[in-house]
Amino acid sequence: MSFLATYGCLVYVVLAMKTKIVKLDAANIDLGQIIEVAELVDRGGLVAFPTETVYGIASRVKGDSLARLSNVKGREPSKPYTLHISRKEEVGRYVPTIGMRAGRLIEKAWPGPLTIVFELNGDDIERQRQRLKDEVFKGLYRDNCIGVRCVDNAVAGALLERTGNPVVAPSANHAGQSPAVDADEVAAALSGQIDLILDGGSCKYGKSSTVVRISGGEVEILRGGVYSDAEIEDFSQVHFLFVCTGNTCRSPMAEGIFRKYLAEKLNCEVDALGEMGYKVMSAGVLDMVGSPVSRESAAACAARGVDIQGHRSQPLSRKLIEESYLVFAMERMHQARVLALCPDAAGKCVLLAGKHNITDPIGQPQAVYRKCADLIESAVKKRIGELVI
């Protein structure tokens, strides 16, 4: 063996000794060890740890730690890092206003292999600037945006939950190299350059997270990953459901009128709502399938420039409720039926008109239908105004 080869081997051994490796059983985590590692991160240490995608390098969000992290990674300090959180509820601390499509992604894809880049409006950015420490704000936000990931790994979650500082965690590799998917690969790439490796076994997916950007209610895929484009499209769909008795009078009127005002809010054509990621539906608590909308309801909507003549009734189902972002009931008995089918919907099922029922106009003169449509339109305008796009 040449001296150079021997010297290279010796250098590797010396460097490897500088990086401690702590092996953890993900099924039986030693919290004492986790606390010690969290304290190391809080002191400014760099710690590699497993996520469900690839291994990351945990760093507190402080100038000195981030500078060291960029040096280890070999990437430009100006390039932003992604905040990692252990519980999805924590995102509100960093993103004060979360739109509907982002909310759906959070609900369906977190915790999991999805990084969301949120674009904050001017008021929210200023609010964060005032609320967070200056170095934390500067370390997390770029061009009014912040990237956030909620991990789905027991070791990662335990570590992030116990750090006293916000933590970013780029992949555990040098820029341009393949991400490490187990502790051995981390050690081969970074031994001697970081302080500790938490060995929690191989990563579940072994590939990077999908990265999306949310801007103005639109979802843009920035990087492919574990979740496919089709899954992201499905996860980010926002469905609204209106419920009445037979689904031939009130709920079809509400569905049609809601579409009109939602399209106005989104500044798009009614027919483009689906492309924008929104779907508006209605259903009835009676088991009526395929019945046409009442002539009086169609006329009341037509007077408002809303065409509902193609509507056909469908029965309420648990599946429809579960898929919906919000469920608007015409009366309390409809609300009760929704909750009987799906108790978990308590937080998203409300009366369309607030505390008031919108009574059934069936069998009444056209003037009663017009009055019912007036009530529905007024309630819809209020609800549309409350929506955060």
Image (cartoon, grey):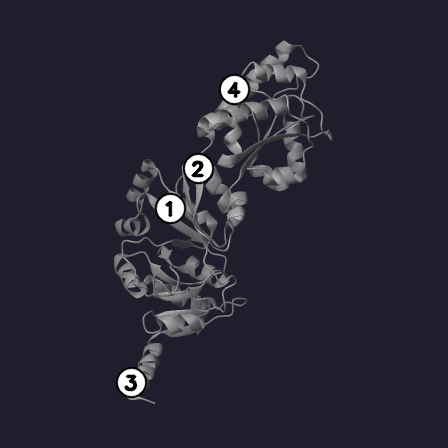
The x, y position of residue 44, in whole percent, is 30, 63
- Which residue is drawn at the image coordinates 64% and 25% (left, top)? 311
**Amino acid marked by disc 2:** Gly
Vertical placement of residue 277 versus 28, above or below:
above
- Mark 3–mark 1 Cα distance, whole angstroms, equals 50 Å
The disc, 4 or 3, on the residue closer to the chain's N-terminal end is 3
Vertical placement of residue 332 versus 203, above or below:
above
**Amino acid marked by disc 3:** Leu
The x, y position of residue 2, in whole percent, is 31, 88
- Mark 4–mark 3 Cα distance, whole angstroms, equals 81 Å
How many numbered marks does the figure carry? 4
Front: mark 2 or 1: 2
Front: mark 2 or 3: 3
Along the line of sight, the residue nearer the viewer: 314 or 41: 314
- Looking at the rendered structure, the secondary structure element under dot 4 is helix
Q: Find disc 1 in the rendering and name its residue.
A: 94
Q: Find disc 4 in the rendering and name its residue.
A: 378
Image disc number at residue 205: none
Q: Find disc 2 in the rendering and name its residue.
A: 217
The disc, 1 or 4, on the residue closer to the chain's N-terminal end is 1
Packing grade of label 3 (10 A; few <14, some 14-19, many >=20) is few
**Amino acid marked by disc 4:** Ser
